[in-house]
Image (cartoon, rainbow, N blue to C red):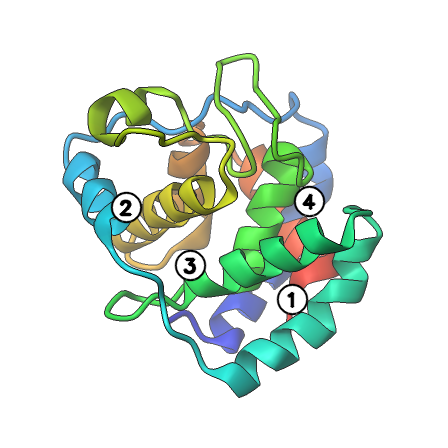
């Protein structure tokens, strides 16, 4: 699990570099690369049962985040389902935890919480997952516009790249977006985390 101090350190670096990053070309939205090792990891995650979470901690998460998400997602049931699924996928039993605020930052930059968003590269849904994943590992009825499927795949891919980069947020986010070596996408995500989704 990434500690709050670890995230704070990256946020400080992001703040220092943000102005320069925003002057570069816009977000690449090139989407995830097809890492050979990633297929088995995502396939395993999709097959897992519902996650079980700490009810007190998840209640605190809802209380803090719901008013922030209300400004972007107007429909109450959709809002609560996003918060539930993000919390669930970032606290999955037996896996390294992801900071849920980081995932919220990724979703904001990738799709602005639009369930039916499609990128110019063809990536779909909240976390902009490429459709080839459904051909590779999808089951009957799987759909990248289904919130649970999209967030489970997205969180699994992000967790994979964080592990590959030994917890370093910037290169992991670059790999997630398919823009390795370019700083603009990670800093946009970290700015969103810092402004809206960071939980102290």
Q: Give the mark nearest the N terminus, 2 or 4.
A: 4
Which is more foreground, mark 3 or mark 4? 3
Say which mark, if any, is on residue 35: none
Q: Residue at x 51, y 83 (%)?
A: 55
Q: Is residue 170 above or below residue 52?
A: above
Look at mark 4 in the image and give the residue it sits on. Answer: 18
Q: Secondary structure at mark 4?
A: helix
Please provide percent x and percent y for residue 178. Answer: 41, 27
Label 1: how many Cα within 10 Å (few below 14, some 14–19, many 20+)? many
State the mark number for residue 198: 1
Q: Are marks 2 and 4 in contact (CB under 8 Å)?
A: no
Quarter of the view holding residue 183: top right
Which residue does the numbered mark 2 point to in the structure image? 46
Q: Earlier in the sequence, mark 3 or mark 4?
A: 4
**Few, some or many C-alpha atoms within 10 Å of disc 4 (few <14, some 14-19, many ≥20)?**
some
Specify which label sits upstream in the sequence, 2 or 1.
2
The label on residue 89 is 3
Whichever of callouts 1 and 3 sits on the residue coming sooner in the sequence is 3
Secondary element at tag 1: loop
Name the mark nearer the viewer: 4 or 1.
Answer: 1
In the rendered image, the quadrant that contains the C terminus is bottom right
Q: Residue at x 37, y 73 (%)?
A: 52
> Does 22 sit left or right of 84 as displayed?
right
């Amino acid at each position: 699990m990434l500690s709050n101090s670890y995230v704070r350190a990256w946020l400080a670096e992001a703040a220092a570099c943000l102005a320069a990053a925003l002057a570069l070309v816009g977000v690449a939205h090139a989407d995830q690369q097809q890492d050979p090792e990633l297929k088995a990891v995502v396939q395993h995650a999709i097959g897992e049962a519902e996650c079980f979470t700490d009810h007190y901690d998840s209640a605190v998460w809802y209380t803090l985040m719901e008013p922030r998400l209300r400004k972007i997602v107007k429909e109450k049931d959709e809002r609560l389902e996003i918060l539930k699924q993000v919390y669930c996928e970032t606290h999955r039993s037996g896996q390294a935890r992801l900071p849920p605020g980081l995932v919220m930052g990724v979703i904001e930059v990738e799709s602005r919480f639009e369930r039916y968003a499609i990128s110019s590269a063809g990536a779909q849904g909240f976390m902009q997952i490429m459709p080839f994943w459904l051909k590779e590992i999808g089951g009957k009825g799987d759909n990248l516009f289904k919130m649970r499927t999209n967030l489970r795949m997205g969180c699994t891919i992000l967790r994979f790249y964080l592990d590959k980069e030994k917890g370093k947020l910037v290169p992991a986010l670059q790999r997630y977006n398919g823009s390795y070596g370019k700083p603009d996408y990670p800093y946009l995500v970290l700015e969103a985390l810092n402004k809206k989704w960071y939980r102290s």
